[in-house]
Image (tube, rainbow, N blue to C red):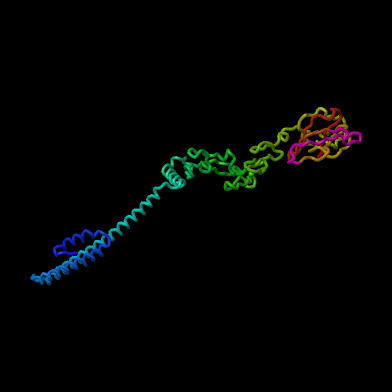
Amino acid sequence: MHMTPGANEEYYSELQSTKNKGNVEQTYENILGEAVTNVKVQTARNACGHKEGMKPRQNTTTDTENVLRQEIMINLRRMKLFMLTAITLTFLVAVVALVLVTMKMADGESSAPPKQETKVQDQNADDCIASPQLCDANAVCENIAESNICICNPGFAGNGKICADLNECTMNTHNCNANNYCNNTLGSFTCTCKLGFSGNGTSCTDIDECASGVHACHKNASCINTEGSYKCSCKNPYTGDENTCNLAAECQTFHNLTSKDRSETYSANTSGCDSGIGPGWYRFRGAAGTRMPTSCPPTRRCNTNAPGWINGTHPAVADGQVSKTVCFHWENDCCRFSTSIQVRNCGPYYVYFFSGTPGSICFLRYCGTE
Ligand SMILES: [Ca+2]
């Protein structure tokens, strides 16, 4: 290529126009080499012109070449700086793009439709927390697949939105034992020892009111402990209830048999007859003795033919009113006749309930003895 020194600007423009192309540095080298060559050619031509009479311009050519070289080098440095800047910017842009892509992907993952279960759970969790009124106050809100549900607390029953207390006592689902009272409470129940039992509610034992002396039995009554309570039983010969025990009526009201001829030792006459005695309670007193004999007396005693005696023993006070057999001795038979009577031991004495004699025949009599 033939170039004049003034054509350097064109090459410089060409250089500028090609700086955006690939292999810029090589291009510059090529341009630089070509420019130098052109300068050398021009210098040679100037030399020829010198030969042709023109004054040679050796120093000027060298200066121009140096200026051009320096300018090209400056531009080359600028180009390198530009390239470095471009590469740096490209790298930064790439990094920023990568960050944005990463953030986008992360955001995409979080915003992408999650698994159904997770979504439901999150939504449900929000519902349970954000809207606790969805469930009854006595229910819990739980997350399950598809939707949240309300479950009544133990001790309650219902659909979760409305929960009603269960009465364990009436439903008989409590665990109170037979000695406990079941007390229904909201959502539960308690056990309380029944009256007559002591304990902590779950273990209750009977109180022995008789042994502890907390009973209310009468002084003439016996205290009998029972499971959960106690009973009072009037001591014989007392009768009544647990609060009042009085002497048995037959011990208070009776007929007195006091004649001497009623004694089993009496044998003067035999005309006595008790076919019409009673009915009523009788007590032997005075000359008649204190009670009936319990062994077979001889016949014709007690002012009668067949004297009556008790075949057996007298009752104790504690025995109360008892039935006894009275035998009448006749014709060598100690119990030729017999009848049943009532006897009570009144403590200091006995009373007997007589009502005639067997067959209402004569002559039979109830006899006394000491
Ligand atoms: Ca008791």
Q: Position of residue 58 (x, y in %)?
A: 12, 72
The residue drawn where x is 59% and y is 41% is: 173
In the picture provided, is 189 more to the left or to the right than 231? left
Q: Position of residue 137 (x, y in %)?
A: 46, 41
Would you say the magenta stretch is mainly helix, strand or loop? strand
Quarter assignment of residue 337: top right
Q: Position of residue 114 (x, y in %)?
A: 43, 47
Q: Quadrant of the C terminus?
A: top right
In the displayed structure, 110 sits above or below 63; it is above
Q: Find the magenta span and give its range.
A: 316-338
Front-most of residues 131 and 187: 131
Front-most of residues 347 and 95: 95
Q: Quadrant of ligand 1?
A: top right
The residue drawn where x is 91% and y is 36% is: 332
Q: Quadrant of the N terminus?
A: bottom left
Front-most of residues 349 and 327: 327
The residue drawn where x is 85% and y is 40% is: 295
The answer to if 334 sits in the magenta stretch is yes
Total number of numbered discs in the rendering: 0
In the picture provided, is 32 more to the left or to the right than 147? left
The residue drawn where x is 68% and y is 39% is: 234
Q: Position of residue 56 (x, y in %)?
A: 10, 71
